[in-house]
Image: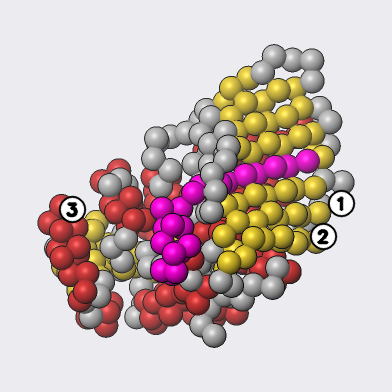
Amino acid sequence: MNLAILGSGMIVRDFLSISHEIPGLALRAIFGLESVRPDLDELSATYAIPAVYTDLDACLADPDVDTVYVGLPNSLHAPFAKRALLAGKHVICEKPFTLGVADLAELRAIAQERDLILVEGVTTQYLSNYQAIKESLPQLGELKLVQCEYSQYSSRYPAFREGTVLPAFDPAMGGGALMDIGIYTLHFVAGLLGRPQTISYTANIERGVDTSGVVVLDYGTCTAVLVCAKDSGGPIRTKLQGNDGTILMTSPPNVCDDFSITLRGQDTQVVDQKLHQHRMVEEFRAFEAMIRTQDLAERDVRLDHSELVLELAATALASAGIRLGPA
């Protein structure tokens, strides 16, 4: 996987810190606007990235690049991923994949037509502890209640309250609590339980964007409640309650650290099967293998899941009267 990185923000820096942990990955280029050229040069020097681009066409024409990682603001995911696919590059796109289902359908059609790998960078689905939770679900008996809570006071919220709207809180840029950290709770629950019968979102809305809120998914015999907040802090936890036992995890759903299983009448057991301390390592190892082996079947499985989550997010936002993207 010969990688070009689009962006220089926090998520890109987080990824670069563990890029050396991904066998088969070679950093080939980094792209950003001319206004962030000092940041690009710094990252290039720190991580030995040979090429720095401020022209996207030139970056995508680089013959040493076969894969593009889109680490840009949410509203730019679809257009930049599309340009990369049309240039014949595999694409890893940060979450949320796109702001609308139609955009993802277009990207998927291009990838399928050209036999390219297209995947969403969402850590949850690739973590060994998440797979262990999925495999442990039958032990809980009939599942009754799921709570998945991710609240994290945003460092950008004070500026937002004072009138400075940065991308994380800009509805035109795809900001807001649900599409930022709340999307992980949707990935977590939908990956375990699939499509619910109904979904609704009750949100705290300021300047047209959700700063926090509660999603309710009805699965018939089981109800899932998802809490996401960027305007307040709170305990982070996930709890799955069945009539034979309970799973409790106190790390964020995009980290999936150790969790406990308590079965009725038995002692609590702590499970930890993670392969690496950093949450992004397992997903990028999976991406590298998918690209190296041209595993189109796995691509389609992953796209099916991402498409479901995006549909659920769109329905939830609509139920709260929230519209994201350019006016």
Pointer 2 local density, CA inside 10 Å: few below 14, some 14–19, many at least 20: few
In depth, the one of 154 and 238 nearer the eye is 154
Q: Secondary structure at mark 2?
A: loop
What distance separates the C-alpha of mark 3 from that of mark 1? 50 Å
Mark sitting earlier along the chain (3/2)? 3
In which quarter of the view is residue 269 placed? top right
Q: Disc 2 marks which residue?
A: 197
Q: Nearer the viewer, residue 320 or 239?
A: 320
Task: Return the residue found at the far right.
Answer: 221
In the image, what residue occupies the spot 61% across and 76% down? 323
Name the outermost residue toward the bottom: 327
Q: Is residue 32 left or right of residue 263?
A: left
* Residue 275 vs residue 288, the one in the foreground: 275
The residue drawn where x is 48% and y is 71% is: 170
- Determine the secondary structure under disc 1: loop
Q: Residues within 10 Å of mark 3 (few under 14, many from 20)?
A: few
Please give the name of the residue rendered at 86% of the width and 51% of the height, measured from the top-left corner.
Answer: 220
Q: Residue 1 placed where, x, y %?
A: 31, 59
Report x, y in % for residue 146.
73, 42
Which residue does the image show at 39% across and 77% down from the upper left? 80
- Residue 150 visible within the image: yes
Residue where numbered disc 1 is placed: 220
3 or 1: tag closer to the N-terminus: 3
- Residue 307, placed above or below residue 183: below
What segment carries the magenta color?
Answer: 145-165
Residue 47: mark in rendering: 3
Q: Label 3 is placed on what type of residue?
A: Tyr
Across and down, in percent, residue 273 comes to 51, 30
**Distance of mark 2 from mark 1, alpha carbons?**
7 Å
Is residue 164 placed above or below 280 in the rendered structure?
below
Asked if the residue at tag 1 contacts the one at tag 2, i.e. Cβ–Cβ closer than 8 Å, the answer is yes
Q: Which amino acid is tagged 2?
A: Gln
